[in-house]
Each structure stands twice: as C-alpha cells, then as structure tokens.
Image (tube, rainbow, N blue to C red):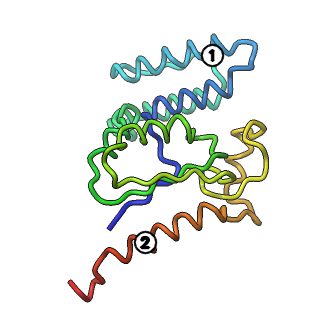
Amino acid sequence: MGLVLTGAPGRSVGQVARSQILAQVTNLPDGDLLMDLYDAAIAAFEAGEPIEPDPSLPEGLRALLLGLAAPVNLPFARELWATDPSRLIAKVREPVLVVIGKKDIQVDWQADGGALEKVVARAGNVAFSYPETADHVLKHEEKPRDTLVAAEVGAHYNSEGRILDPEALAVIGDWLHEHARDEPHPAEL
C-alpha cells in the first residue's frame, strides 16, 4: 500500500488561494485595495459570518467568495479552507510519494513542498519529486514558469495534444513499481 499525492499543498487551501490571488492582482493599480477587500471577506467567512463581497472586486473573485459561503458548501468549505495538510501527512504511516511540478502555478513546489518536507523529515516514509517541466496536472509545460498566466493555464490543462510530463510519469511509475514489490499479491493474503 501507499499514497501518491500530486500537486499537494503544504499550506492550507486558504493560504494557497490567497497566494494565487495575490499573484494575479499584485500588478494591478488597485491591487493592495483588492487584497484588503478580499482579506476582509475571508475574515468574515472564517468567523462564520455572512460574506458580502465588495462590488469593486473582480467578478471572478466575488464568485469565489460567494461560492465558499454557499449553504451547499458549508461547513466543508470552512474546514477545507483552514485544514493544514502538513499536519495530516505527518500522520500517514504508509509510504508516500509527493509530486509537485516546478511549472505548477497553483501549488508552489518550494513553499508547499518545503512545508511538507519539513514536517516529515524524520518519518522516512515520504519521498518527494519536483519534475522540472510538469504543471499542476502533471502535463508537460514548455513555457517558463514566470510567463504562465493562471487564466490561460487553467483553460488549457486538458487541451488536445498536451501530454503527461515524461519525468513525472517516470517518477510515479518507478515509485509504484518499487512499492508494489513490497506488497503481497491479493491472492497471497
């Protein structure tokens, strides 16, 4: 048995989302104001209060905030928003492979991978791989990471002609092959 995690955050989903939003609005003339409005809405969400996104927020950001607070998404959204994945991975005793592509713009291989590595450093059951040209869904990405734009990337994750990143595929295949040998075949149980 074992667990393969791809594009795994090492921070809470709330922290990851904030860093993604910050990256998108940081160069806008009113980026600081937008982040303040976003942070105020998230503070209300985390406190269990209703979210009333400021009308000056971009439509996509307002939709995100309203989606978090939609009754159908509660209380799951609040729990997910605050859960620290690094605490959870520390409890796993089975072998784990964490694969985060260096071209992933949703999860940062250094921030998230580093947080996960730190918490499991002594466990000895977790392996990490950071394929150079893999994106969030482990597809091969040629463009430099600093030129990738979130809206374009997300829209093309499953575009025709995109292939799995060969390095990511090899790492996962090798890890599965190695760990499959350690397990008894179901017929042997």
Image quarter hosting the C terminus:
bottom left
Instruction: Identify which residue is drawn at 62% across, 16% down.
Output: 34
Q: Amino acid at mark 2?
A: Glu
Residue at disc 1, secondary structure: helix
Q: Is residue 74 visible?
A: no
Q: Is residue 146 above or below residue 174?
A: above
Q: Are marks 1 and 2 in contact (CB under 8 Å)?
A: no
Q: Which residue is mark 1?
A: 34
- Image quadrant in which the N terminus is located: bottom left
Horizontally, residue 68 falls left or right of residue 170, namely left
Near-viewer residue (70 or 28)? 28
Mark 1 or mark 2: which is in front?
2
Q: Which residue type does callout 1 highlight?
A: Leu
Picture layout, residue 90 above or below residue 63: below
Which image quarter: residue 137?
A: bottom right
Nearest the viewer among 166 and 37 is: 166
Q: Is residue 87 above or below residue 142?
A: above
In depth, the one of 55 and 1 nearer the eye is 1
Residue 73, position in %: x, y? Answer: 40, 39
Count neighbours of disc 1 (C-alpha within 10 A) and say few if under 14, some if 14 to 19, many if 20 or more. Answer: many
Q: Residue at x 47, y 41 (%)?
A: 9
Please name whichever residue, 156 or 135, is drawn nearer the observer in this view of the structure: 135
How far is disc 1 from disc 2 in space, using C-alphas?
A: 48 Å
Q: Earlier in the sequence, mark 1 or mark 2?
A: 1
Element type at mark 2: helix
- Residue linked to disc 2: 178
Residue occupying the point 70% across, 65% down: 163
> Horizontal placement of 158 versus 95: left or right?
right
Residue 112 is labelled as none
Task: Check disc 2: other Cα within 10 Å, few if <14, some if 14-19, many if 20+.
Answer: few
